[in-house]
Amino acid sequence: MSHLPNEELISAAAGELGQAGASELGVIASLRAQGHEPEAVRAAIEQCELRSKAGIAWKPGGQTRQHWLLTRDGLEQASHPLVAQFHANLIVQSGVNHVIDLTAGLGSDSAAFIEAGLRVTALERHPDTAAFLAHNVPEATVLTRDCTEVDFAHYLAAQYTIFIDPARRVGSRTADGARALPERDPERWSPSLSFVTALADRFQIYMKAAPAFAPPRGWASFMISVDGTLIEMFTTNAMTGVHAVMIDSRTEQANVISTSPNPTKSVANDICIGGFLYELDPAITRAGLSQQVAGELGVSPVGEKGIWLFGTSSVPFAHARQYEVHDHFPIKDVKSRVAHLPGIAIKTKDSRRGLKELRKASGKGDHNDWAIVVLGSGASELAVLVQREP
C-alpha cells in the first residue's frame, strides 16, 4: 500500500452513503466523477464499511477511535476496548512502565496501554497493517517486524513487560468470507506457546487466549465477559490464582471475583416451586467459581456444569440472571405443562439434549419471559419451568 486511505475522502464517502436512497455503486460513481482515483475510492468505501461494522463495540474507545484505519481481519482480532482497558489496568498494577506489544495489529491494546500512562513499543509483521497501526496509535514506537525475530536481550536492562495475542486461526477464509478455523494446538499458534513460555523466564508476560485454553502451571487466569458474553481468557506469569472478570459496558466498570483460600461451603437445596434459579455469568462458570459463589450467596449449585444455582429465596446478585421457579417435571411432560403459555425460551446448556428436539417437543415458539431450563441427564434429568425476574 503506497498511501494510507484519505480521511477527507472517507468522510465524503460516509456522507454520501448516509443519504436516503444512496447505493454503494452510486457513491463510487459520484466520487470518481469528482476526479478521485479508483483505488482511493475503493479504499474509502472499505473504511466506511469497516467503521460501520465496528459500530458500538468500539464506542467505549471514545473519540480517539473514530478516525482509525481498519482491516477486516484486524477488526475481528482486536480486543474489545473495555477488555483492552482491563488488560492495561492489570499491567499498570504490576508497576512496570513500558510494554512491548508483540502482536499489535491495529492497536486496540496498544492504545489502551498509552491511555493508561504506559510507554509502548508495538510490533506488527505485516507492512500495511503496521502503517495503519502507526496512524491509529501515533504515540507508540511501531516496528514492522515479526516478534520471533527480535533480539530480546536488548530489552532486559530496562523494566519491560510483554503483551501478546497469538494468532490462533489457520488457513484462509472460506468461500463465503467466514473466518478461518481456530487452531487448538498452541504450538501451531503464531507465535507458539513454547516461544511465549521461553520469554517468561526473563519477562513478565501477559497473554490473551481463547476461554478453553489452559494456562501454564503457576500462571494466573482471568476469564473475561462483557455484558454476560464470554470474550476471552487472559493469563500472566506476574500473578497467580483464578479470576472471573465481569465488565459492564454501560458503566464501563470491571468486577472481579477471585478464588478464595477459605471458601464458604454451599448449602444443599432441592428445587422447589416458589424458589429461584440463578444463571451465572459465563466468566464465573468457566473460571470454576460456581461453588464458591454459591457458598457466598447461601444457595446451592444444581445441574452438572455449574451454570445454575438454586435458592429458596431471592438473593440480589449482579452477575446472574434470576428466575422464579413455577414448576418442575420430567422432560416427557413438557408439552402438557407449558400448554397454557404463549411461548417459552429453552435453555439446554446443562443438558445433552438438542435445542431443536426440545422446541419441537414443547410445541411452543420462543418467548422472553418464560423458559424451560433442562438440568442434568439420564435418570437425573429435570425440566424446570421458570419466569424471568425483572
Image: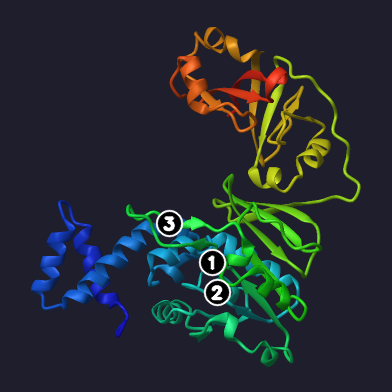
Secondary structure of the residue carrying tag 1 is loop
Mark 2 — residue? 103
- Asked if the residue under mark 2 is in contact with the one under mark 3, i.e. CB atoms within 8 Å, the reply is no
The crowd level at tag 1 (other Cα within 10 Å; few <14, some 14-19, many 20+) is some
In x, y percent, where is residue 172?
Answer: 41, 62
The quadrant holding residue 132 is: bottom left
The crowd level at tag 2 (other Cα within 10 Å; few <14, some 14-19, many 20+) is many
The amino acid on which the numbered mark 1 sits, given as a three-letter code, is: Ala
Say which of 160 and 335 sits in front. Answer: 335
**Residue sitting at 32 percent across and 52 percent down?**
176
**Residue sitting at 46 percent across and 72 percent down?**
106
The amino acid on which the numbered mark 3 sits, given as a three-letter code, is: Arg
Vertical arrangement, residue 351 with respect to residue 86, above or below: above
Nearest to N terminus: mark 3 or mark 1: 1
Nearest to N terminus: mark 3 or mark 2: 2
Mark 1 — residue? 167
Say which of 113 and 193 sits in front. Answer: 193
User: Gap between marks 3 and 2, in whole Å?
Assistant: 19 Å
**The C terminus: image quadrant:** top right
In x, y percent, where is residue 47?
Answer: 31, 67
Secondary structure of the residue carrying tag 3 is loop
In x, y percent, where is residue 260?
Answer: 85, 50
Mark 3 — residue? 179
The quadrant holding residue 147 is: bottom right
| In-image side of 256 versus 46 (left or right) | right
Viewer-nearest of discs 2 and 1: 1
- Asked if the residue under mark 1 is in contact with the one under mark 2, i.e. CB atoms within 8 Å, the reply is yes
The amino acid on which the numbered mark 2 sits, given as a three-letter code, is: Thr
Say which of 89 and 124 sits in front. Answer: 124
